[in-house]
Amino acid sequence: MSKKVINTKINGTNYTAEVEPRMLLIHFIRDVAGLTGSHIGCETSICGACTAIVDGMAVKTCAMLAIQADGAEINTIEGLAENGDLHPIQEGFWECHGLQCGFCTPGMIMAASQLLERNPNPTESEIRHGLEGNLCRCTGYQHIVNAVQYAAQKMQS
Amino acid sequence: MATLAGPSRLIGAPIKRREDPRLIQGLSHYVDDLKLVNTLHCAFLRSDYAHAEIENIDTEAAKRLSGVVTVITGEDIREKVSSVPCAAEIEGLKIPNHPALAVGRVRFVGEPVAAVVATDPYIARDALDLIEIEYRELPVVVDMDKAIEPDSPVIFEEFGDNIAFTMPLDAGDVDKAFAEADHVISHRLVNQRLIPIAMEPRGVLAEYLRGEGTLTVWSSTQIPHHLKTFLSLLVDFPEHRIRVIAPEVGGAFGSKLNVYAEEAVVAYLAIQLGKPVKWIEKRGENFTSTIHGRDQINYVEIAVNNDGTITGLRAKLLANMGAYYQLLTPIIPVLTYLMIPGAYKIPNIKLELIGVLTNKMATDAYRGAGRPEATYIIERMVDLAAQKLGMDPKDIRFKNFPQPDEFPFEIPTGIIYDSGNYQETFNKALGIINYDDLRDQQSARRKRGKYVGIGICTYAEISGFGPSIGVAGGGWESSTVRIERTGKVTVLTGVSPHGQGQETSFAQIMADELGVDIDDIAVIHGDTGRQPQGIGTFGSRATPVGGTAMLIAGRQVKDKMAKLTAHLLEANPDDLVFENGKIFVQGSPAQAVEFATVAAAAHNAVNLPPDIEPGLEATHFFEPEKFTNPFGAHIAIVEVDPDTGEIDIQRYVAVDDIGHIINPLLVTGQVHGGIAQGLGQALYEGAVYDENGQLLTGSLMDYAVPKATQVPSVENDYTVTPSPANPMGVKGVGETGTIASTACIVNAVVDALSPLGVKDIEMPLTPNRVWQVIEDAKKGVSE
């Protein structure tokens, strides 16, 4: 299979690599860029564990080819904390026990970041609908909802 | 880090987790995140047929593909990798050979048939498509009622039939109880098959170092120590040269309480090839080839008198084993059998448990493991009895509870409940939900045409596994507590948490015990190279058994430190207090010696009392004398939309009694997650095989794991009845939610539809099914 050179910027760092056209973006992020914080839970775009922000949109990166991200700016969980300070959503997940095994958490946090960007003061129902594309098997979601509410409050103040 | 200032009692405090900073920043390492140089990638070809003879396998084209290192089949390893283990011991149990790769015959869809190793995971999967297998199809049986018929296709010819085992029980005088009862209620209850769906699929990475002669295996497992032992037997490698590491594990719920074929094959390949080999399960494989849960059909009768007293229970329990056994497959329904009376005094019980082989994936422990099934049986039957008698479901429960002064309370199956006060817990839940007013409100809303239901589940559980007599492979746990030279504390534990948070809760216990800052304690788990012995995390056992092992090891070290400190201070060791990182004679904190100073003295070893060896380390194996028995009361209010069959859960109250609570934040998280899974069974989830043994629900599109919009917010509370089974009085909390919520929700929905004459609905209560039940009821076709 003929390979193609792509360039992406992930968390502010440029990554250039020659990849097979069939390579999934999540594999590029994890195996080429070496950023393993985004996880693979299904490779069928349902569970949301691989969610990252691609050109400003929360994307399930298993549902996109790496070559489609040529020239894209990508933000993953590793880039969320700034200068060692946790993002308010990360803080919320920690304060409110919004995670247990942690496998869905990076994707959940990235999805929540888009949710709060679009709707800084969501209701409980809006939070639940906004995170519908991300599955968690551990928490029953209640503490995740609390975590997003915590972050919303903190980000507004 | 969240620490409380001063001479705190951290036990009981809602400390936020010490695990979280790495997990919320993407800095943790699950198996797939580990990279070793020159790693090869493994992929498995799996059977597309539920039952077939393998007539030929042609791997030549796959082997020729560039990048493929090797392709192996069952024939290649039949003398080299032994049968996948089952640890169950049941009288008369027929145990089939379970080859890691199928030999001659396949018996379920998803059974591994061949393994490919390649330089790249994409190439490994390409190669799977180049393997040609000729199958000759055989008759398939997936339905248990059919599998036990004499003319059924037989899964293992050497057994003659599909009955894996039968287990009878006859306690009391059941025939007399039924003959004299005012009412006998009979019902068939189905506990549908579920798929655990941990968000992290399974994964294995194995590395063999030829020079050192060591095998290191990283696996997404709940039981690294058992895996080490079993791997040594599976691939005939000396156990003392194997190290198993469970790195970050992304959920399990029992599904990783196993030793799987893939773990053996990957270890074998790493030894053969002399390079690291990695396999990461695809979600589709997780559906077909990681254990399933539940799958029982229960024929149940209870004898009840007009005043609500339940005098007898008779049941035939059919439990679907699947085609082969995994580690505990036949044991799981035994827990249903043992716990069938639930929270009630039922003196006369007659049971027949039948394990049935079918052409499906093996069942095994899935959160609750046999106890949600038992709870579902008894809680549905109690509600059916109340409905028959025209009695409030609250009253029939109080009528049949044991009294608090009857504990320890022995039930006819031989289990002795450790401690309990079911009345107090139930009353608390009834009070929170304002039950008495609720029934009036329900009547008023019903008059307005609303289908409102109140569901109750009062459960009793068995957990904290446990005495070794009740746990295959041992029920003890082991821990080592070591004070380092600098006064830092290393806790090594044999339990293997995968989301439960023992790095935090165990540190809380040890901080209180040693009087040191929680940040000075590291809790290490999941590595047989660091913690020599252990069993693992399952059955709500980590804190009651593993926590106790740690506490006792900690006390042994503390005793030694006290002797040494007494020597240094010329004091009596019994008078010493450990607090705030200092050790001093009670009442004389000004003359304290630093904890770290004593630690250094123990290692410098120049001024030790004569009977004290250098070093500060103790290992303890804790074998509990008895199980623990959490209990509780869950109450839900639901409204059913008769036009769509949709169910709206309007309130959910959970009052659980798990004995003393170490960290209420983590405990509530466990209850929430458990309720979501139990509710998933009640409303959404079900593994469906067609008559050919094809798994129709083999993806997250077809199998409904609850989403954020599908789970209610829960109102949690607790009562505290300490367990006498361990010095901390803890019972274990991992499974309570799952055990209670399934029956609670179904009882609520049936109650909502009871004015239509509905007595039962088979799970899952999907809108379509509920709507159909309503339509049938309206036409007078009651279930």
Image: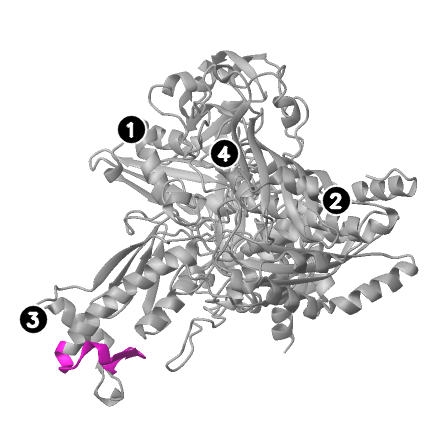
Distance, label 1 to label 3, CA atoms, is 47 Å
Seen in the picture, residue B425 relative to B361 is either above or below; the reply is below
Res A136 seen here: no
First in sequence: mark 2 vs mark 4: 2
- Circle 3 residue: B606
Residue B489 found in image quarter: bottom left
- Circle 2 residue: B183
First in sequence: mark 1 vs mark 3: 1
Give, as a three-letter code, the residue at label 1: Asp
Distance, label 4 to label 1, CA atoms, is 26 Å
Q: Which mark is residue B236?
A: 1
State the SS at label 2. Answer: strand
- Circle 4 residue: B330
Name the residue located 44 percent from the left edge and 56 percent from the top edge: B27
Circle 2 packing at 10 Å, graded few (<14), some (14-19), many (20+), is some
First in sequence: mark 4 vs mark 1: 1
Give, as a three-letter code, the residue at label 2: His
First in sequence: mark 3 vs mark 4: 4
Magenta residues, as a range? Answer: B567-584
Circle 1 packing at 10 Å, graded few (<14), some (14-19), many (20+), is few
Mark nearest the camera among 2 and 1 is 2
Res B404 seen here: yes
Left or right of B305, for residue B289: left
